[in-house]
Image (cartoon, grey):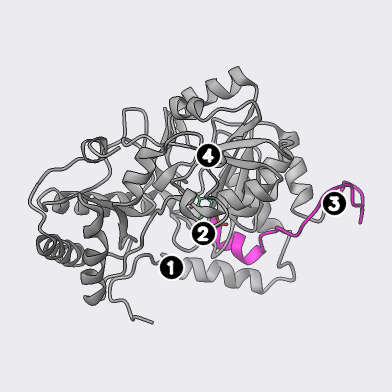
Amino acid sequence: MTAWRIRLASPEITDADRAAVLRVLHTPVLSRGPEGTALEEEFSRRLAGLPAALVSNGTAGLYLALRALGIRGGDVITPSFGFIGTLHAIRLAGARPRFADISPETLCVTRETIEEAWTTSVRAILPVHVFGTPPPMDAIARLARERNVALIEDACEALGAVAQDRPAGTHGDAAVFAFYANKQLTTGEGGLVVARERSTIDRIASMRNQGRGEREFDFVGEGFNFRLTEMQAALGRSQLARLDRMLAKREAIAAGYARRLARIPGICALPSVREGDRRSWFVYPVFVEEPEWRDPVRKILAAAGIETAPYFPALHGFEGFREPALRGSGLAVTSAVAARSFALPFHTALTERDLDEVSGMLERGLAAAGASTCRLTLPTLVGSFA
Ligand SMILES: Cc1ncc(COP(=O)(O)O)c(C=O)c1O
């Protein structure tokens, strides 16, 4: 394994975080206790007061949200530019993913691409806030209401984002967040579901806990063990107390990259978000002008000890998701973006020197590839290929 000098991701763990976890270990309650309850309340306060349930990870949360909203079959419209866990959750719930294309402005689905992918079997829309950028949730929520289908926001990458003046995750029937170690806030593994209706969260709270009912040792329905531990919840509370500071640091690092990238030929960053939206920086993706430049450039970075990742490959290229029947449209923007994108190191411990080094190696790699055009933008780059 390569020993990376500049890592792709790295959780920010402070002494206060460690102390919070240790405090739990001095008590007899390691699961289903006061830390979890308090963290649900604290998240709820940040998310427009919606009822909330902690779960063991984002995939489990998506699965439980689908089941709790009665999705057991039919089509669920979702992007192919996203993470595979979303598709596993849809399949596990008994439904079929149907891919809608993305906008080159947000890399997320739009009302129009969802309509293009529509079938008579659609039961739910599951947009993803890709890389922490919000989709046009107001227009998508209107469509879900008009067509009378469920709307579940995959906000796993978007804690702290704002979609049309409201917190990401508060537009749909339910929304899911995730807390793996590369996320804006981490509990090691972990997830959260919020829902419009208290009854949806009550069903999820029962299902995550073996289908438990109200009475003592009573089991009333479908169940699993998708609980979060008290140690994880304590870490989550300690992290949530400084989430805004961590988000601000991520935003400053993203701005540092953007300044440097603007001077490098052959590459571009994400476009700015529109007014009323706020991106919560999850990873830092870049897009090369020619797809064949990507791997040689990544190799040059790797040789210098700089870790990158091919976020995201198009999901409709993976085994098990290639059937043409899953494609709701041509997916031209998805394919054009996926072929050109990869993620740079991105976490709160990066220094200005790290950013200089990463962008210096990028410049060298792109020059070797023959890049010469400066000031690309993603919509113009993708527009010319899609
Ligand atoms: C868009 C998206 N959906 C779902 C998930 C699944 O979350 P988890 O890995 O916690 O199961 C992730 C996590 O990386 C994600 O990025």
Q: Quadrant of residue 68?
A: top right
Q: Residues within 10 Å of mark 4 (few under 14, many from 20)?
A: many
Is the C terminus in the top left, top right, bottom left or bottom right quadrant?
top left
Task: Please identify, in this view, whether the residue under mark 2 or under mark 4 is nearer the observer.
Answer: 4
**Residue 302 placed where, x, y %?**
26, 73
The reply to whether callout 2 and callout 1 are in contact (CB within 8 Å) is yes
Give the residue type that dot 2 points to: Ser
Side of 1 where 24 appears, left or right? right
How many numbered markers are drawn? 4
For marks 3 and 2, the one nearer the N-term is 3
Give the residue type that dot 4 points to: Thr
Residue at the image point whose x is 91% and y is 56% from the top = 217
- The residue that label 3 is drawn on is 212
The reply to whether callout 4 and callout 3 are in contact (CB within 8 Å) is no
Q: Relative to 239, does residue 174 appear above or below in the rendering?
A: above
Q: CA distance from mark 3 to mark 2?
A: 29 Å
Residue at the image point whose x is 59% and y is 17% from the top = 146
- The residue that label 4 is drawn on is 78
Q: Which residues are magenta?
A: 211-238
Is the N terminus in the top left, top right, bottom left or bottom right quadrant?
bottom left
Q: CA distance from mark 1 to mark 3?
A: 36 Å
**Residue 215 lies in magenta, yes or no?**
yes
Q: Secondary structure at mark 1?
A: loop
Q: Secondary structure at mark 4?
A: strand
- The residue that label 1 is drawn on is 14
Task: Please identify, in this view, whether the residue under mark 1 or under mark 4 is nearer the observer.
Answer: 4
Which mark, by number, is residue 238?
Answer: 2
**Residue 245 lies in magenta, yes or no?**
no
Q: Relative to 276, does residue 1 appear above or below in the rendering?
A: below
